[in-house]
């Protein structure tokens, strides 16, 4: 196997960190602008587009707020998985790319917290991330969307 495109959430579930940040942001910025986390799309790329529009109303840089929150709280939401780590080590020599609909600050912090940064050569985030990582890795790259699929690559 020469190349593998891996969904970030196959390495560790980043959804709880994202939801916690949305709840924190809703409380933190309530006096400036209304943010209802429940009304945002589940797709984080689509949610980011709405957050960009929200920020344009003078709220500020939500990317920086997300980065700070993720750095402060990642350890509460993400744990290194020895089996995932072993699977990544077995892929040594293959080009590994990670894709996610999550914004870049969350993806960067999550990869570091999960101990995967050194294994990954390409990271694509947001809308179209899967297509971009496949373009970088080539059309024959294996695609891994779940932890179970990643662990099966070890066999």
Image: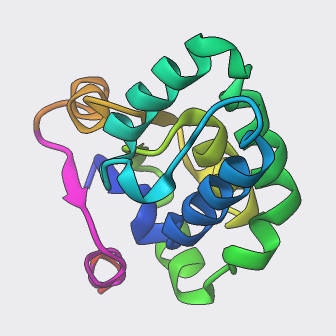
Residue at the extreme right: 72
Asked if residue 103 is positioned above or below residue 82 in the image, the reply reads above
Residue at the extreme front: 31
Quarter of image, res 31: top right
- Quadrant the N terminus occupies: bottom left
**Of 112 and 67, which appears nearest the observer?**
67
Q: Position of residue 16 (x, y in %)?
A: 56, 71
Q: Position of residue 36 (x, y in %)?
A: 50, 50
Q: Is residue 40 left or right of residue 22?
A: left
- Quadrant the C terminus occupies: bottom left
**Of 29 and 52, which appears nearest the observer?**
29
Q: Is residue 22 left or right of residue 140?
A: right
**Of 54 and 104, which appears nearest the observer?**
54
Q: Residue at x 73, y 57 (%)?
A: 24
**Of 123 and 138, which appears nearest the observer?**
123
The chosen color scheme is: rainbow
Numbered range of the magenta stretch: 140-152
Q: Residue at x 32, y 36 (%)?
A: 46
Q: Is residue 11 left or right of residue 47?
A: right
Asked if residue 10 is positioned above or below residue 147 in the image, the reply reads above
- Report if residue 146 lies within the magenta region: yes
Q: Position of residue 58 (x, y in %)?
A: 69, 13
Camera sees residue 90: no
Q: Position of residue 122 (x, y in %)?
A: 48, 34
Camera sees residue 137: yes
Quarter of image, res 23: bottom right
Q: Residue at x 25, y 77 (%)?
A: 149
- Report if residue 143 lies within the magenta region: yes
Q: State the count of labels.
A: 0
Q: Residue at x 45, y 33 (%)?
A: 48
């Amino acid at each position: 196997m020469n190349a593998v495109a891996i969904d970030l959430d196959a390495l560790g579930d980043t959804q709880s960190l994202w939801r916690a940040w949305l709840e924190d942001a809703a409380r933190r910025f309530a006096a400036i602008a209304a943010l209802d986390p429940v009304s945002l799309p589940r797709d984080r790329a689509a949610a980011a587009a709405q957050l960009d529009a929200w920020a344009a109303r003078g709220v500020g840089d939500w990317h920086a707020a997300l980065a700070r929150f993720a750095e402060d709280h990642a350890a509460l939401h993400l744990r290194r998985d020895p089996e995932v780590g072993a699977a990544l080590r077995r892929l040594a020599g293959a080009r590994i790319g990670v894709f996610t609909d999550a914004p870049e600050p969350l993806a960067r912090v999550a990869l570091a917290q999960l101990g995967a940064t050194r294994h990954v050569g390409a990271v694509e985030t947001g809308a179209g991330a899967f297509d971009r990582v496949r373009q970088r890795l080539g059309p024959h790259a294996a695609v891994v969307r779940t932890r179970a699929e990643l662990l099966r690559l070890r066999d």
